[in-house]
Amino acid sequence: MRSAVVTTEGDRIRWVELPGREHARVYVHGLGATSPAYFAETAAHPLLAGHRSLLIDLLGHGISDRPTTFDHTLEAHADALAEALTSAGATGAELVAHSMGGSVAVVLAARHPHLVSRLVLVDANLDPIPPRPGAVGSSGIAAYSEQEFLAGGWQEVRDRVGPQWWSTMRLAGREALYRSAVHLARGTAPTMRELLRDLEIPRTYLLPEDVGPLLGADALTEAGVAVVPIPDCGHNIMLDNPDAFASAVAAALGQE
């Protein structure tokens, strides 16, 4: 386990690092998750093993610190991640990023382009999402006020998301979980989709085949983003179909 101070208050991001050849690969989890749990099998897969790999946890999640004063906007997450990667000497990294982590990775690549050489987004959020009371995920969490969420709304979320997601969600600070969900639902200006279209690095977007065509896929493809459906999986592609996921990531990173 490695770590880096990423705020002026001394808060640390931590990651599990696997040694190997450069360029580094950085795996970034989604809301309420943790990268070692979601990406260990991927990083060790025969198609992908051998590169220096950082399975990193965003501030407020997993094994990273849980400051209650951090605002957890997508921009703040991206800047904190940039501090960690700079400290780790992981410039020009290949990012593989899931869900909210994909949103953060897009913002990171736009704000700190020297840190990212390739981007693989895994069913990532590209657009704002209206808050929806009772929904599973960020839109449901964002429907609470912070006071409501901290006072007991988190228990309702726990019961909605089920034991697998809660097993990692419970590791997140409650302020971090709430604020990250709110800002993920709110998105960025320009939107993550617009930022993604304007990037000039190789970009791939992986999505579950069964959910149907990706909204705005033609415009993304025209902008140079490879949109790749993966069969036999849901939102957690790397857990549901690890071999197909590893194969698609390897192709996106130029290994096949």
Image (tube, rainbow, N blue to C red):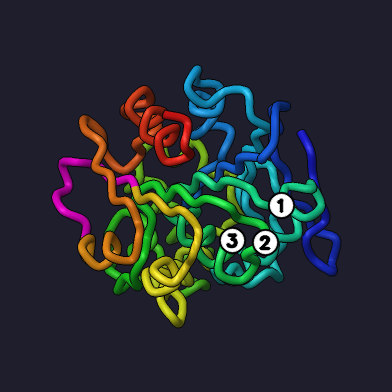
Q: Residue at x 61, y 54 (%)?
A: 173
Return the mark for residue 114.
2
Q: Residue at x 59, y 63 (%)?
A: 108
Q: Amino acid at mark 2?
A: His
Q: Which residue is mark 3?
A: 176
Q: Distance of mark 3 from mark 2, alpha carbons?
A: 27 Å
Asked if labels 3 and 1 touch by Cβ distance under 8 angstroms, the answer is no
Instruction: Name the quadrant containing residue 79.
Output: bottom right
Q: Is residue 191 above or below residue 80?
A: below
SS category of the residue bearing label 2: helix
Q: Is residue 169 above or below residue 20?
A: below
Ranked by sequence position, the earlier of labels 3 and 2 is 2
Q: Amino acid at mark 3?
A: Ala
At which x and y percent is residue 105?
A: 53, 58
Residue 209 is covered by the magenta coloring: yes
Asked if labels 2 and 3 touch by Cβ distance under 8 angstroms, the answer is no
Q: Nearer the viewer, residue 219 or 86?
A: 219
Residue 142 appears in view: no
The residue carrying pointer 2 sits among few (fewer than 14), some (14 to 19) or many (20 or more) residues within 10 Å by Cα, namely some
Q: Amino acid at mark 1?
A: Thr
Return the mark for residue 91.
1
Ranked by sequence position, the earlier of labels 1 and 3 is 1
* Span colored in magenta: 206-214
Residue 245 is covered by the magenta coloring: no
Return the mark for residue 138.
none
SS category of the residue bearing label 1: loop
Q: Distance of mark 1 from mark 2, alpha carbons?
A: 6 Å
Q: Residue at x 57, y 45 (%)?
A: 94
Asked if labels 2 and 1 touch by Cβ distance under 8 angstroms, the answer is yes
